[in-house]
C-alpha cells in the first residue's frame, strides 16, 4: 500500500536560512511524488512534482526536491527562506491524479 | 479565469443531519476529486468523479456519496453526520489523465 511519512511535525527556521523538509514514501511501483503548500484557510498549491527523469526537480517559489529511490525519500529544499514561506507543507504520492496519498504535513515557522 | 470554487465556506451541523457541499472545477477541467482534511492531518482521498461517474473511491463509508453534473461541477453528500466528520473538505479538479490537481479553499464543516 502506498503511504507517506513526514517525520517533522513542526520546523522553525530563521529568515534567510536554508530549509529541508523530509518525506519518505512507500509505493509498489515508480511513484509520482508531489509537494504541496497550504496557507491558513486556503487550499493546497502545488510546489513541484516528480514522475521520472532528472531526480532533482525545480518548483515554484525557489523550492526544489530530490528523489532518492534507494532511500525512498523526496525531500524538499530551499536555500534561503522568506517570511512568506511560513505555511503547512504536504508531501504526497500517487499514480497521476488518482487516489493521492498525503503525509500528515510539516508546519514551517519562520523567525525574523 | 476562476479557479476551483467551493461553497459554502463554513457550515455547522448537528449529529445525524445530512449535508451537501458543492464544487465548481477550474475552467476546462473535467475531473473532480474530494478530500477530507481533519485538523492537524493531511488530506485523505474520498472519491473521484469523471464523466458523471465515480471512478475511484478511498476508504470512506457509504454515508459519503457524490455526484457530478454535465457541466463537471460536483456535490459531496454526507448522511447521518458524526462528530468525527468535522473537517475541512477539499475539492480538487484536473484534466482526465492529467497529473496536476488544482484545489479549492475548502468547506469547513463542524458537527456538533
Image: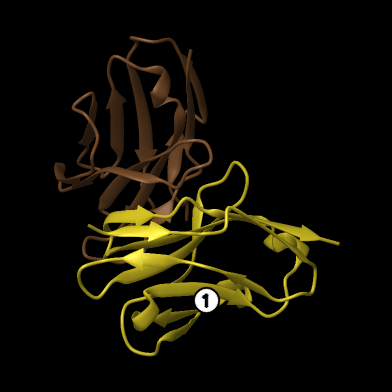
Chain colours: A yellow, B brown
**Residue A1 placement: quadrant:** bottom left
Residue B105 picture location, percent across and down:
51, 43
Residue A33 picture location, percent across and down:
37, 69
Q: Secondary structure at mark 1?
A: loop
Within 10 Å of the Cα at label 1, are there few (<14), some (14-19), or many (20+) other Cα atoms?
some
Nearer to us in this view, A44 or A31: A31
Nearer to us in this view, B70 or A97: A97
User: Farthest residue toward the bottom?
Assistant: A54
Q: Residue at x 41, y 67 (%)?
A: A24
Residue B89 picture location, percent across and down:
42, 36
Nearer to us in this view, B32 or A50: A50
User: Farthest residue toward the right?
Assistant: A112
Q: Is residue B80 left or right of residue B6?
A: left
Q: Is residue A48 left or right of residue A111?
A: left
Q: Residue at x 45, y 47 (%)?
A: B42
Q: Give the position of the C terminus of chain A as an image quadrant.
A: bottom right
Residue at numbered disc 1: A59
Label 1 marks a residue whose chain is A
How many marks overall? 1
Nearer to us in this view, B9 or A94: A94
**Residue B91 placement: quadrant:** top left
Residue A40 picture location, percent across and down:
63, 45
Q: Residue at x 35, y 19 (%)?
A: B19
Amino acid at each position: 500500500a502506498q503511504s507517506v511519512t513526514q517525520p517533522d511535525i513542526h520546523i522553525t527556521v530563521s529568515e534567510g536560512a536554508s530549509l529541508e523538509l523530509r518525506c519518505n514514501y512507500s509505493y509498489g511501483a515508480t511513484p509520482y511524488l508531489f509537494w504541496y503548500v497550504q496557507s491558513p484557510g486556503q487550499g493546497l498549491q502545488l510546489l513541484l512534482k516528480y514522475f521520472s527523469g532528472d531526480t532533482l526537480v525545480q518548483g515554484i517559489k525557489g523550492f526544489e526536491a530530490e528523489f532518492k529511490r534507494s532511500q525512498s525519500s523526496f525531500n524538499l529544499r530551499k536555500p534561503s527562506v522568506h517570511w512568506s514561506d511560513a505555511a503547512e507543507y504536504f508531501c504526497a504520492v500517487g499514480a497521476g491524479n488518482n487516489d493521492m496519498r498525503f503525509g500528515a504535513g510539516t508546519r514551517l515557522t519562520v523567525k525574523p | 479565469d476562476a479557479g476551483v470554487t467551493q461553497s459554502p465556506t463554513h457550515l455547522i451541523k448537528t449529529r445525524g443531519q445530512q449535508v451537501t457541499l458543492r464544487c465548481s472545477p477550474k475552467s476546462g477541467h473535467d475531473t473532480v476529486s474530494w478530500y477530507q482534511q481533519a485538523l492537524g492531518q493531511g488530506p485523505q482521498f474520498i472519491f473521484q468523479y469523471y464523466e458523471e461517474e465515480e471512478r475511484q473511491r478511498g476508504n470512506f463509508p457509504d454515508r459519503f456519496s457524490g455526484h457530478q453534473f454535465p457541466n463537471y461541477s460536483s456535490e459531496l453528500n454526507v448522511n447521518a453526520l458524526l462528530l468525527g466528520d468535522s473537517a475541512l473538505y477539499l475539492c480538487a479538479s484536473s484534466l482526465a489523465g492529467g497529473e496536476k490537481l488544482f484545489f479549492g479553499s475548502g468547506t469547513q464543516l463542524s458537527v456538533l
